[in-house]
Structures are given as C-alpha cells and as structure tokens.
Amino acid sequence: DVKVTQSSRYLVKRTGEKVFLECVQDMDHENMFWYRQDPGLGLRLIYFSYDVKMKEKGDIPEGYSVSREKKERFSLILESASTNQTSMYLCASSSPTSGSLEQYFGPGTRLTVT
Amino acid sequence: AQKITQTQPGMFVQEKEAVTLDCTYDTSDQSYGLFWYKQPSSGEMIFLIYQGSYDEQNATEGRYSLNFQKARKSANLVISASQLGDSAMYFCAMRSDTGGFKTIFGAGTRLFVKA
C-alpha cells in the first residue's frame, strides 16, 4: 500500500525559529512536492523535486527552502518562521512510471507560528 | 503562466442527482495532464480521475466523468447519482509535462449533498 508520511500532524513554533517539515514516501517515487493549503486559495506549490538533489521553485517559494538528499525524503525548511506561514502543509509524490503521474499525499502538517 | 480556475466556491446538490464542477485552465504546453482530487473533512487528498491532453475520449471512473473540452481549456468534473459521502472539497489540478512535472491546483469547490 502506498504511503507518504509527514513528521508531525500539528506543530507550533515561534516567530524567527527555524522549522523543518519532513516528508517520506515508500513508493520509490521520483517526484516530490510541497504545497501549502489555505482557505479560499486551494493548494499552492512551494517547491518540487524530480530527482535526488534536484529542486525547482513553485509558485510561492519565498521564505522557504527544500532539501532532497535521498530519494524517499523531501524536507521543507522555514529559515525564519513568520506568522504568515501559519498554514496546512501537504507533501505529495508521484512517479513517471504511472501513466498519469497522479499524486499521493501525506496527511498534512498544520503549522502555527506565534 | 499556468493557472487553474475553479469559479464555484460552493455547490449544493440533491442526493441522487448529477452535479458538474467547473474547471478551466491556462497553459502554453502542448502536453499536459488534468486531474480531480477529493478532500473529505478528514483531510486526506484522494485522486479521482485523470485526463491526458492527447486523450480524445473523456475519462470516466465509476460515477465520475471528466468533460474535457480542449479548445475551451475546460475540464469539468461530472458526478452522477450524488451520494451523501460525496460532500467534500474538490480540487482540479494540472500537470505540466515540461520542467519536471510541475503540478498546480485550483482553489477548490466545496460540494454539499443534501438528503
């Protein structure tokens, strides 16, 4: 059974802290994605990666960075958390071997920055 | 720039009736894919249906069908015989086949199924 896991379901951090959100998939997928989900805005793409050590900016990369040192793990880093980064963060993965490249999602991390 | 537009923030449908959720997209790619995902109140994202840009026939998956009109750049989701369990957020998404399979989502439509 395919699985994408995220390190925390809920996280509370203070403004200015460095925050790490971890995502692990066990499907040997090449592509991994980080989104944030906010009411009325849907899912917005922060960063994605199509191979180990490769990363591409999405639509809202400002204030975030990512790391992909191993195929199964894709980390999202908030260098200095701010209150406007309070959101639900969703990780997803997909594989080119699937004809459609549908994405498999993790359960999400609800991050609150105070 | 690529964009997905879902113009219906919320929709109501009577149980057992059909409903259409609208999605329009904008891309300069020749090859791309279109998806619909469902997000129940529990929060997980569930893949429903896929349409490739070169597929000539509309995709169907059980009670779900995708009304693909390429010239109009629309990819509407049709749910037939609505059930109470269909109440959820529905997201339209588009995958680019250039630049690493970037996938973007629309703002979503919340569907309420009435008994």
Image (cartoon, helix red, strand yellow):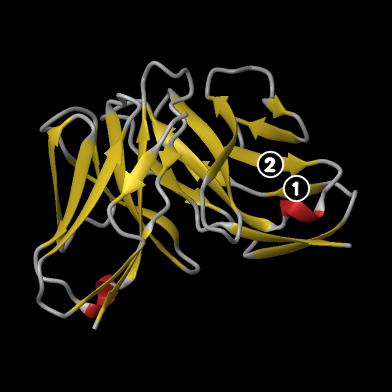
User: What residue is drawn where x is 69% and y is 50%?
Assistant: B21
User: What residue is drawn where x is 16% and y is 72%?
Assistant: A81
Q: Amino acid at mark 2?
A: Leu
Image quadrant where residue B67 sits: top right
In terms of depth relative to the viewer, which is nearer, A112 or B64? Answer: A112
Instruction: Report x, y in % for residue A113.
Output: 24, 77
Disc 2: which residue = B77
Q: Amino acid at mark 1?
A: Thr
Position of A56 compared to B82: left or right? Answer: left
In terms of depth relative to the viewer, which is nearer, A36 or B73? Answer: A36
Q: Which chain contains the residue that carries disc 2?
A: B
Q: Earlier in the sequence, mark 1 or mark 2?
A: 1
Position of A70 compared to A92: left or right? Answer: left
Instruction: Report x, y in % for residue B8.
Output: 65, 61
Image quadrant where residue A97 sits: top left
Disc 1: which residue = B20
Are both tags, 1 and 2, on one chain?
A: yes
Q: Label for residue A41?
A: none
Q: Which chain contains the residue that carries disc 1?
A: B
User: What residue is drawn where x is 30% and y is 24%?
Assistant: A28
CB under 8 Å between discs 1 and 2:
yes
Q: Residues within 10 Å of mark 1 (few under 14, many from 20)?
A: some
User: What residue is drawn where x is 43% and y is 37%?
Assistant: A104
Instruction: Report x, y in % for residue B115.
Output: 89, 62
Image quadrant holding the C terminus of chain A, namely: bottom left
Q: How many marks?
A: 2
Is residue A79 among the parts visible in the rendering? yes
Q: Residues within 10 Å of mark 2 (few under 14, many from 20)?
A: many
Q: Is residue A68 above or below residue B12?
A: above
